Image (cartoon, grey):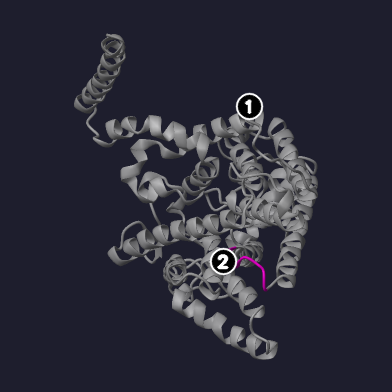
Amino acid sequence: MNLSLKQHASIPRSYLAVVSALLAVALISLVWLKVPNLLIPMALGVIPLCVVVVFKLPFWVVLGFVCFSFFRIHEAFPALYVLRIPQLLALGSLACLAWHLFISRKLQIFWSRELSWLMAFFILCAIGVVFASSRPVAMAYFNGVFSKIGLMTVAIAWLMRKPEDFSKAAIAFFICGLMIAIVALQNAAAGREMVEGTRVTIGRSMGSVLGDPNDLALTLLFPLGFALAFSLQRGSWFIRLLAVCSTIAIIAAMLATQSRGGLLGIATISAVLAWRRVENKTLLISIGALALPILFVLAGVSERSSGGAGESGIDESSMGRIYAWQAAFKMALYNPLTGVGLDNFYANYYFFSSHWDGKNHAVHSTWFGVLAETGFLGFTVFCILVFKVCRLAHGNLHLLAKQQANANLGLLACAEGVFAGLLGTIVSGTFLTQGFTWPVYIFTALVVAIAQLLRQPLQNAKPAI
């Protein structure tokens, strides 16, 4: 009798579960009928699972947001665009960071001098927005891009606690680089999205950030250091093979962009990693001196309609950069404390350039871009930040060299990739505008996180989330 009563009492709960499931299926079916894109209802069906993942795996959520935002994967593969993945990952990243920082308190936070200089630069940029020549333009860029970069830089530094985290992040970066490189090589082979007839881009027709060959080269340069470092490191044969394939594809795609800044970045990353492995430095310098001209020939830079061999003297592309750099210096002189404001160089080019050819131009330089848009004060803080991060990255490698026998191979490869990529970014920054985009700040986060891991006894580290 008691058993039957218990069974009878459990029936309503069973019915409730069944009815709830049927209602959920009916709702998804209605959405499926009304929405023409079949991927949207499928995405709605996995939302509950995604919520659980967001709070259980914050490292992967933040890493996914960085990969989609920087590599513009949804623009390289337009079928993903309608899903609004970067926006969803941004919301998920903010939610899980707030949860683990203020509620669960499982997020282990720390601070360093490099992060202090980073925050000082971001504060100067925020102040510069108020005094920008075009406040709406500066405010839009700060709110839409730069504030997210600042937040995620600190989040990456705090979330990466174990050596395996650095291996996973580095592998994710060069896999994303491989995906972008494959799309670029496909466009080059088919003659799609080309600039000046010979320079490959991605998504130019839809206004993608990758629609500029220099920006595409910049995007591909970032994962190259990780791919090359993992190619040269002992470890899993599958990861090493994947890294080798990624390296070849990324370099081939960068050659197809015909970006001189990109070529300098390739040469720098290769030189840094080779310098650590080749004992005969004289032979290495000689090989490098011969390889760089060959690299320019393979890239077909001389075939460019601008900056190619067909132009005598200083080519049009180089003169355009010189005029832009002169304008940047004049902008800094006009407002030495705050500059003209974020993303305001292009709009102010007409007023400060000594040469007007009927259109505004980009600055095409990290250093002059920062100088123009943040003034001499912001430029000084930015240079100090870069110097301190480079010194810390070199110190990380020195510490790992001391414990060579016990060092985690993935962590060592990631540290080498960060150091080589950072120097490559600095050198290529002469011709590529990277002052307010992801690379410098992701490298900063990784360098600070590696330093925290190496300098903190592992037995005192809190359990990972």
Element under disc 1: helix
Could you tell me which secondary element the residue under label 2 belongs to?
A: helix
Amino acid type indicated by mark 1: Ile
Closer to viewer: mark 2 or mark 1? 1
Q: Check disc 2 and give the amino acid type.
A: Gly
Whether label 2 touches label 1, CB < 8 Å: no
Task: Assess whether residue 358 is covered by the magenta stretch.
Answer: no
Q: Residues within 10 Å of mark 1 (few under 14, many from 20)?
A: few
Tell me if 29 is positioned left or right of 236 in this view: left
Query: Image height check: is 143 above or below 249?
Result: above
Quadrant holding the N terminus: top left
Q: Is residue 331 above or below residue 307?
A: above
Give the x, y percent position of residue 301.
48, 73
Q: Position of residue 140 (x, y in %)?
A: 57, 33
- Which residue in the rendered view is the most extreme toward the front? 1
Identify the residue position indicated by label 1 in the image.
103
Which residue lies under the disc numbered 2?
A: 225
Q: Is residue 219 visible?
A: no
Range covered by the magenta-colored residues: 405-410
Q: Is residue 445 left or right of residue 357?
A: right
Dominant secondary structure, magenta = loop
Pick whichever of labels 2 and 1 is earlier in the sequence. Answer: 1
Q: Quadrant of residue 286?
A: bottom right
Q: CA distance from mark 2 to mark 1?
A: 37 Å
Q: Quadrant of residue 84?
A: top left
x and y, in percent, of residue 192 in the image: 31, 58
Q: Looking at the rendering, which quadrant does residue 167 occupy? A: bottom right
Is residue 441 or residue 60 the one in the foreground? 60
Q: Position of residue 402 (x, y in %)?
A: 75, 71
